Amino acid sequence: MAQPAQSPSQATMPRHVAIIMDGNGRWAKQRARPRTFGHAEGVEALRRTVEAAGELGVAYLTVFGFSTENWRRPAEEVNALFDLLRLYVARDLDKLVREGVRVRVIGAREGLQRDIALIIEDAEARTKNNSKLNLTIAFNYGGQDEIVRAARRAATDVAAGKLQASDIDHKIFESYLDTEELPAADLLIRTSGEFRLSNFMLWQSAYAELVFLDVLWPDFGKEALTEAITIFRARERRYGGSAPDPA
Ligand code: FPP
């Protein structure tokens, strides 16, 4: 996961946009509908956003679909979220294949139902040669869990003599993360007016610009994505360095 190459003065398009899709429950509540209705509308927002990301030239889009903490929700809601992943892939995979979208799913595979694991493997395999837009769905994902799993795998390799503990640096450690093939996040958006990372992309967001929008996820689409990108482009990124000299 290379450090983005652009200099601070080149406030350009974000290469990797990560989104915490929040507010489905409140959106449904405002309409006196069940939370699951909000999640279903959330899938429509996701479809619009994937389309918009492609149109706007975003190369990597990563979305938070189900967190390791979401298991604490009522079983009915958890099942609905799993059903929505099934439905989304069943309905959209052919189109994603055709349109050059590469699909990846990050998060723990353990604990997922067998059919979900197979759906994920199929979606990843069928899109593996695509490169127009990299869509990554974080599912059964937690940033701390990802880091712990990476540490465990690295430790296993050290114990097996495949890796020297003293050789572990940022780059090697990143190769054990679920996001091994993805660049660092440039722009992290959270909808619904909440100001938290909620365990999303903790490592990958080290230098991301954070944009919090006061829009509930089911209302998200090209307009809101464009707004977030406009905010991003007006920011000056320094990656821990000093401000550039005035021109
Ligand atoms: C947060 O809203 C959203 C989620 C927990 C799940 C996000 C899921 C989707 C957008 C649809 C499913 C998509 C896939 C690919 C499975 P919330 O329920 O926390 O809303 P609230 O904070 O208003 O209650």
Image (cartoon, rainbow, N blue to C red):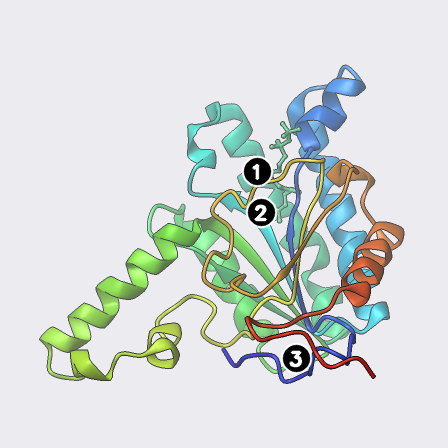
Ligand 1 is within 8 Å of the C-beta of the residue at disc 1: yes
Residue at disc 3, secondary structure: loop
Q: Residue at x 52, y 61 (%)?
A: 105
Inspect the image, locate mark 2, and give the three-letter code of the amino acid beneath it: Gly
Q: Earlier in the sequence, mark 1 or mark 2?
A: 2
Q: Label 1 is placed on what type of residue? A: Leu
Q: Are marks 1 and 2 in contact (CB under 8 Å)?
A: yes
106 with respect to 30 (left or right): left
Q: Quadrant of ligand 1?
A: top right
Mark 1 residue crowding within 10 angstroms, few (<14) / some (14–19) / many (20+): many
Question: Mark 1 sits on what residue?
Answer: 81
Question: Front-most of 40 and 107?
Answer: 107
Distance in Å between CA atoms under marks 1 and 2:
8 Å
Asked if residue 40 shows in the view, the reply is: yes
Give the mark, 1 or 3, whose residue is nearer the N terminus: 1
Which sits in the foreground, 170 or 115? 170
- Numbered mark located on residue 130 in the image: 3
Assess mark 2: CB under 8 A from ligand 1?
A: yes
Residue 230 located left or right of residue 245: right
